[in-house]
Image (cartoon, helix red, strand yellow):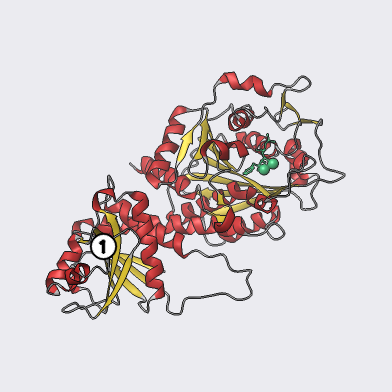
Amino acid sequence: MEFSVKSGSPEKQRSACVVVGVFEPRRLSQVAEQLDKVSEGYLSNILRRGDLEGKAGQTLLLHNVPNILSERVLLVGCGKERELDERQYKKIIGKTISTLNDTGAMEAVCFLSELHVKGRDTYWKVRHAVEAAHEHLYTFDSLKSHREEPRRPLRKLVFNVPTRRELPVGEKAVTHGLAVAKGVNTCRDAANMPPNICTPIYLAEQAELLAEQYDNLTVERIDEAQMENLGMNAYLAVSRGSENPAMMALMHYQGAKNDSAPIILIGKGLTFDSGGISIKPSENMDEMKYDMGGAAGVLGAMHALAELQLPINVIGILAGCENMPDGKAYRPGDIIRSMSGQTIEVLNTDAEGRMVLCDVLTYVERYNPESVVDVATLTGACVIALGPHATGLLSNHNPLAHELLNASEQSGDRAWRLPLWDEYQSMIDSPFADMQNIGGRPAGTITAACFLSRFAKKYHWAHLDVAGTAWRGGKEKGSTGRPVPMLTQFLLGRASEQSS
Ligand code: BES
Ligand code: MN
Ligand code: ZN
């Protein structure tokens, strides 16, 4: 779908549809009032008859409104004017998109981007409208035999901004919104793919497909034999029970002219996590295909980054692996020497994400990274702590943590910081090795991060636990595309720092 911005008055649009807001109770927005005046009270008459209360998400499609050049006017309920916040705004944009898709209108001019949203400017409103539109249109049906496609889908949506002066900012918002949306879709496609198709090699192939589209993006594969030579024994231990070989895909994005220190993004890519010998209960086990959500998030963020061509150097790593029970599988009790030299006593083979990530954290030391952010569906405890709304954030560097929190606030892709105090470290002390791979039930998200922190001492590091946010279960099952918006925002922030 195509998006653009313009600045004009609603009655002068020659479009298949103009979209304007109505507040509760039955109050026309400023733009709707303009249409009402030109049409000699046509809209206010309809409201008086009680056909639209203005509740958020209500819609009413009108044809042949007097003295209006457009074929249709879509009235969209926006709730109480004072209560229009970010969530409400995205909801009404989504509703607008699906309503337009059901009409015959293939293009529309939307004035909802002129509504007042608490604390947000035109840039934010246009960008999030573009993102919300994509979010709403997304489907994953490539594996269905019969696909349903709208008869006359919406093809072009124009957002109106109040003044011509705001056109450049609106255009920038469309560009940024489109890049984030592409990244989010890439992430969702990869994550939704079933585990018999989406294997560690498939993840590397997706990275390579992306790299074909951009000159300054290249992919390097590290296979099991290379991991063996590198001494990545913790990573390999997890993979031992699987017939699908592990594969690490390194995506090198060269955006800066110089060889300035890269930002590194690492994604946990467990294409299926059965738990291994410490096998999981069978209920909802299918959802463990989403245990590569971190890798999908990194793939998506790399897509957005390449789309934006930001002037920074970034390496995205997809740490692909599968955790299965087998005669060759690693077992509880095993002691493994990690790439760092530190030994790990395995007490639960289901705490595999940290085993994979710890070796990747050691591996990236060779790049002298500016900072390292790992993204992982790491702990069920994070779902208990924060639920589906916030990503868990833990870091060894306060400025980096704040940068990421700001990015999450700005992008509407929320994160919440948990402490990484030294007091928690002793919970993973082992009687026989340098550490054990679990810390017991209390503070499970924090002890998992403590484990990782022992491998991330040489650089600024942050860890995003997306166990609760990367996908939705139940009736609305599917990848959310998180934390692509937050990561993209973080990179946008880094890029503007470098260019100013
Ligand atoms: N991938 C899971 C974490 C997970 C579980 C994410 C459920 C989302 C929903 C991870 O590998 C895991 O199994 N973690 C264990 C750790 C435990 C054994 C210390 C967990 O959280 O139960
Ligand atoms: Mn597990
Ligand atoms: Zn896992």
The spot of residue 443 in percent (x, y) is 59, 28
- The reply, left or right, for residue 348 in relation to residue 95 is right
Say what secondary structure mark 1 lies in.
Answer: strand
The spot of residue 119 in percent (x, y) is 27, 44
For label 1, the residue is 21
**Residue placed farthest to the front in the image?**
49
Above or below, comparing residue 56 to residue 292 in the picture: below
- The reply, left or right, for residue 467 in relation to residue 121 is right
The spot of residue 104 in percent (x, y) is 37, 79
How many other residues sit within 10 Å of disc 1, few (<14), some (14-19) or many (≥20)? many
Residue drawn at point x = 31 percent, y = 59 percent: 55
Which image quadrant is residue 446 in?
A: top right
Above or below, comparing residue 359 to residue 23 in the picture: above
Residue drawn at point x = 75 percent, y = 44 percent: 226
Residue drawn at point x = 28 percent, y = 49 percent: 83
Above or below, comparing residue 119 to residue 334 in the picture: below
Q: Is residue 63 visible?
A: yes
Above or below, comparing residue 439 to residue 220 in the picture: above
